[in-house]
Image (spheres, helix red, strand yellow):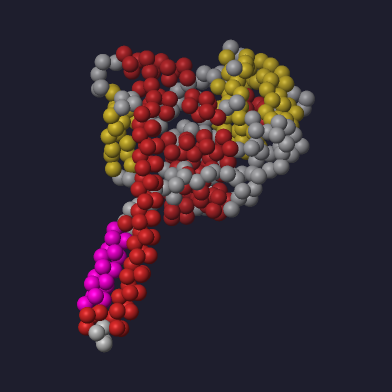
Amino acid sequence: MLLLDEPTTHLDEKNIKWLLRELRNFSGSILAVSHDRYFLKQFADLLWVFENHQVKEFTGDFVHFIEFRKSLSLNQKNVYKSAKNKSRQLQKSAQIISSKADKLAKTSIRNPFYGKKSKKLAHLAKNNQRRIENLEKVEKPYEKKSLKLRNSFNLKEGKNLIKVLNLDVIREERLLVSGLSLTISTGDKVALIGDNGVGKTTSIEAIMCAKAPVVTRSENLEIAYFHQDLSQLDDSKNLLENILNGSLESEQTARDFLGAFGIRRDKVFQKTISLSGGEKIKLALIKTLLSGANLLILDEPTNFLDITAVKALEDFLLSYSGGVLLISHDRELVETVANKIYKISGQRIIEL
């Protein structure tokens, strides 16, 4: 039996394919913890889902699991909506019955017959109230909020943010990429892919440091760069303070983003030093997204993120009106978000 804990976290596409081949040929049982949607789709036929302090089992592959969850979510919304409608009807009915009972109670002083009728109506009103209380126990499903920035920037669609022409990427006197050329315009979602060690991160750093005429930048270009060292976080501040420091976004927007990434309620007021490594990654990423920059450079943003957070990032990037330069081995994210894909291979860069 094999036990695998996030086996694809630092693997490139080539090695993920190799791993999947090895696992398919393995004759024993395999238990894997993973948030990699592509890996799960290719690998799993039985899922244990940890949710709300419970473990739920799903027999079937990941694609069918996602479809099942969508269907379940829709059903929960319908049940909640039906319960709310029924509750409103019963409340209206209870008010009418109570009003009649009160009137009859006053009349019963002169006529005992109305006193008995008043008691029956009062009893009926109590029964309605109990039914209302039971209906109100139906839990409201969590509604995912649309992740959009309140303070958008004024940039013309298609305007060049940054243009790179024949940049040689060198590290420690070793040529990694020869003649790197690419253009990122407003609205572009550019993915930079390739095997580990070919120079993707070094290429980004070279682009950020290079000057004209090799690299030309828009006059109002503002870059926010996400990477894994977490140096942008202040451990002495709480989560909201970290995000809003340097951001023009509102506290509510920050809370919406934190909630979409799975960090909710009073946790937003915790000191950053108390967070787990994965939670700090989420916080640093959200801080980058809410920085007000019009070009986001994201270096492996999904490492250590759970599926909820990855989906939140994906939804945001699809609606983001600025430019994005993305390094990622998350095949699902790249295929969903990117409108341009560049691959570094053999010291060259090619557009796919």
The x and y percentages for residue 56 are: 28, 38
Which span is picked out in magenta? 116-134
Reply above or below: 104 against 214. Answer: below
Q: Is residue 179 found left or right of 301 in the rendered image?
A: right
Reply above or below: 114 against 195. Answer: below
Image quadrant in which the N terminus is located: top left
Reply above or below: 302 against 253. Answer: above
The x and y percentages for residue 238 are: 50, 53
Q: Which residue occupies the foreground of this view, 250 or 327? A: 250
User: Which quadrant holds residue 337?
Assistant: top right
**Residue 202 can be seen in this image:** no
Q: Which residue occupies the foreground of this view, 141 or 309? A: 141
The x and y percentages for residue 172 are: 62, 20
Image quadrant in which the C terminus is located: top right
User: Which quadrant holds residue 318?
Assistant: top right
Residue 132 belongs to the span the image colors magenta:
yes
User: Which quadrant holds residue 169?
Assistant: top right
Q: Which residue occupies the foreground of this view, 90 or 34? A: 90
Q: Which residue occupies the foreground of this view, 85 or 224? A: 85
What residue is rendered at 30% in x and 83% in y? 106
What residue is rendered at 35% in x and 53% in y? 83
Q: Is residue 57 found left or right of 179 in the rendered image?
A: left
**Residue 265 can be seen in this image:** yes
- What type of secondary structure mainly makes up the magenta span? helix
The x and y percentages for residue 342 are: 60, 20
